[in-house]
């Protein structure tokens, strides 16, 4: 049978408890609260990192699209056939009118893009004597080397991407001095 304290009318086991169970459960509650709080902080940090990565990818796509568009610009050829003795480095700003990232000819992302192009000089072009247009005019074909740099900036996100691409066009020798600042 249960032993009872005859003076108070309570079981003897309740009388001997000292509150250790209460203290242990409060400590466990505090530890669990701290764990949950730290996990929530990690989730917030991961959301920021993934958002920054997405912004960086978008700026890269826009800069790459602008550099591809620059290579089709016919003004490069027109400048080389003129009478200039030096081709100045040029900068074009595509404010928000064009950022075709999937190649369909429409603006997919609306952000400012800065394009810089510079002439890097002529280089001998071996094996190009079969070009009918150049051979007919008794001209020497050379590689006209260019550097194109694209920079896209996504405002309010501090995301910037820069792309620099080098390439060449095969044209008649023009004796134009190189003028690359980058």
Image (cartoon, rainbow, N blue to C red):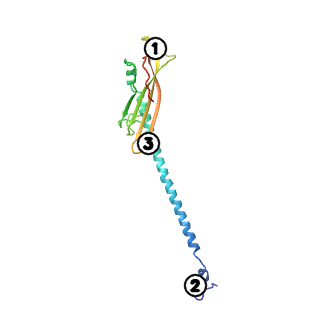
First in sequence, mark 1 or 3: give its number. Answer: 1
The residue at which mark 2 appears reads as 10
Residue farthest along the bottom direction in this orientation: 7
- Residue 159 is marked as 3
Image x and y of residue 20, in percent: 59, 73
Helix, strand or loop under label 2:
loop
Q: Is residue 83 above or below residue 149?
A: above
- Residue 140 is marked as 1
At x 59%, y 80%, the residue is: 14
Q: Quadrant of the C terminus?
A: top left
Left or right: where 94 falls relative to 33: left
Inter-mark Cα distance, 3 to 2: 71 Å
Inter-mark Cα distance, 2 to 1: 114 Å
Helix, strand or loop under label 1:
loop
Q: Quadrant of the N terminus?
A: bottom right
Inter-mark Cα distance, 1 to 3: 45 Å
């Amino acid at each position: 049978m249960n032993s009872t304290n005859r003076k108070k009318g309570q079981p003897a086991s309740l009388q001997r408890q000292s509150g250790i169970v209460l203290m242990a459960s409060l400590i466990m509650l505090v530890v669990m609260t701290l764990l949950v709080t730290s996990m929530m902080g990690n989730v917030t940090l991961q959301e920021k990192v993934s958002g920054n990565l997405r912004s960086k990818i978008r700026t890269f796509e826009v800069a790459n699209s602008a550099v591809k568009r620059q290579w089709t610009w016919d003004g490069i050829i027109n400048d080389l056939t003129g009478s200039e003795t030096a081709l100045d480095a040029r900068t074009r700003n595509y404010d928000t009118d064009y950022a075709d990232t999937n190649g369909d000819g429409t603006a997919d992302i609306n952000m400012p893009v800065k394009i810089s192009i510079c002439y890097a000089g002529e280089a001998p072009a071996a094996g190009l004597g079969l070009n009918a247009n150049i051979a007919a005019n008794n001209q020497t074909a050379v590689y006209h080397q260019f550097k194109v740099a694209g920079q896209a900036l996504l405002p309010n996100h501090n995301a910037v991407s820069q792309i620099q691409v080098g390439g060449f066009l095969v044209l008649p020798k023009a004796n134009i001095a190189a003028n690359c600042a980058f």
